[in-house]
């Protein structure tokens, strides 16, 4: 799965990248602000974007998620401040940080199953809230 990480904390983003790549996913970019996230989504066409709520330069993950939705990129929030379920039109759900490696892996598997409309999705990990 091609994944875009939208996260302003470099160490958190690099850890997420290491974990996801060890599972065979391709992290196409780590973006820390709205503009670089949207440009990466347009030009690199990820299957999934993991989006934090607070971004560099005062950016907002909700803005990024709305734009990702508009261009057809699935979004899973990964943040300490999960937005409410009324954001189900723009995101699959939310992983609540801090995340363990296992929660991240399981959350991405659930997101992939939702995108593929799997009849037997994996169990939802602790700290994950689905919007759909």
Image: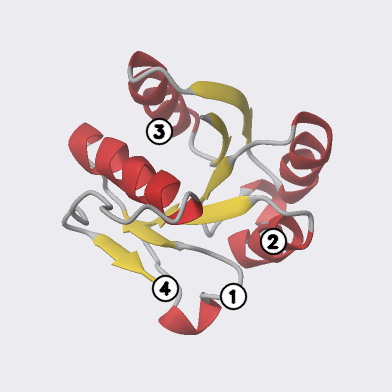
User: Is the Cβ of the residue at disc 4 closer than 8 Å to that at disc 3?
Assistant: no
45 relative to 26 in the view: left or right = right
Disc 3 target residue: 12
User: Is the Cβ of the residue at disc 1 closer than 8 Å to that at disc 2?
Assistant: yes
In 3D space, how far apart are the residues under numbered discs 1 and 2 (Cα atoms)? Answer: 8 Å
Q: Residue furthest bottom?
A: 86
Mark earlier in primary sequence (2, 3): 3
Q: Residue at x 40, y 17 (%)?
A: 24
Q: Residue at x 28, y 52 (%)?
A: 121
Number of residues whose C-alpha sits closer than 10 Å to that of mark 4, classed few (under 14), some (14–19) or many (20 or more): some
In 3D space, how far apart are the residues under numbered discs 4 and 3 (Cα atoms)? Answer: 24 Å
Query: Quick one: quadrant of the C terminus?
Result: bottom left
105 relative to 12 in the view: left or right = left
102 relative to 111 in the view: left or right = left
Mark earlier in primary sequence (4, 3): 3
**Label 1: which secondary element:** loop
Mark earlier in primary sequence (2, 4): 2
Q: Residue at x 40, y 66 (%)?
A: 81
**Label 4: which secondary element:** loop
Disc 2 target residue: 69
Disc 4 target residue: 131
User: Is the Cβ of the residue at disc 2 closer than 8 Å to that at disc 4?
Assistant: no
Q: Position of residue 11 (x, y in %)?
A: 42, 27
């Amino acid at each position: 799965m091609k994944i875009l990480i939208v996260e302003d904390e470099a160490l958190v983003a690099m850890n997420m990248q290491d974990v996801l790549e060890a599972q065979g996913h391709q992290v196409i970019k780590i973006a820390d602000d709205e503009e670089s996230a949207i440009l990466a989504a347009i030009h690199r066409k990820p299957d999934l974007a993991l989006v934090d709520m607070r971004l560099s330069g005062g950016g907002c993950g909700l803005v990024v998620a709305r734009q990702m939705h508009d261009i057809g990129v699935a979004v899973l929030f990964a943040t300490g401040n999960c937005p409410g379920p009324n954001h189900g039109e723009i995101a699959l759900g939310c992983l609540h940080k801090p995340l363990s490696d296992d929660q991240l892996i399981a959350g991405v598997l659930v997101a992939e199953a939702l995108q593929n409309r799997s009849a037997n999705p994996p169990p939802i990990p602790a700290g994950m809230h689905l919007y759909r």
